[in-house]
Amino acid sequence: GDCPEIDFPGAHNVTTHIESDYRKMELEGEQLYANTKDKFLKERIAYQLIKLHTDDTEAMQKIYTEKLLPVRSESWVNYAALLWVYTFKNGAESDYQLSRVFDNCEDKAARCVALFDADPGAIKLAKNGHEKAVLLTMELMQKPFRVLPQLKSIHALDPGNKHFLLLLVREIN
């Protein structure tokens, strides 16, 4: 169930103070972002701004779109931010974006598989055979049973799929 609220003298002041600190950090981050030309710093500031908004998926998406995407980076920070944005969402778009993180950021791959919903609409968002194979790979990683027909599909779509050998060994064993 829900945790009970603990009431103590000054509790409202503590909450107000925390909210004020978050708002202050957000404003400082916005100012830093606006005042720097450095791509490296812009990317990291945008990432921190996203993390300040974990309770507001629309705000995270907006920051990602307006501040991080224009940096045009393929660094781990871009994919870590993308994971933050789509950790709190579901559906085809979420699965597609999680597959991009899975494919490009090894240290986030397990989390992406755990969050992956295998929405059938995600495959329609894939831009090429490689992206389709990544989506199928993630789906198979969630299935602990025989998947030989799907393995054939992955190999046909992307013969160089970096996870194919892992899936094949699992199929054999």
Image (tube, rainbow, N blue to C red):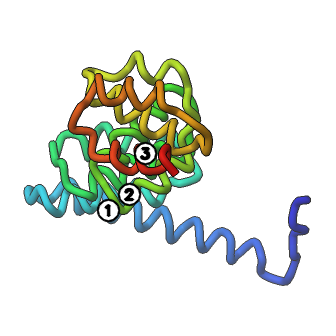
Tell me the kind of residue under disc 2.
Leu
Numbered tag placed on residue 167 in the rendering? 3
Name the residue at 30% across, 54% down.
105
Marks 1 and 2, the one that precedes in the sequence: 1
Q: Nearer the viewer, residue 153 or 90?
A: 153
Q: Are marks 1 and 2 in contact (CB under 8 Å)?
A: yes
Tell me the kind of residue under disc 3.
Leu
Between marks 2 and 3, how big is the CA–CA gap? 37 Å
Q: Position of residue 65 (x, y in %)?
A: 31, 37
Numbered tag placed on residue 49 in the rendering? 2
Between marks 1 and 2, how big is the CA–CA gap? 7 Å
Mark 3: secondary structure? helix
Q: Is residue 17 above or below residue 73?
A: below
Between marks 3 and 1, how big is the CA–CA gap? 43 Å
Q: Is residue 27 above or below residue 60?
A: below
Marks 3 and 1, the one that precedes in the sequence: 1
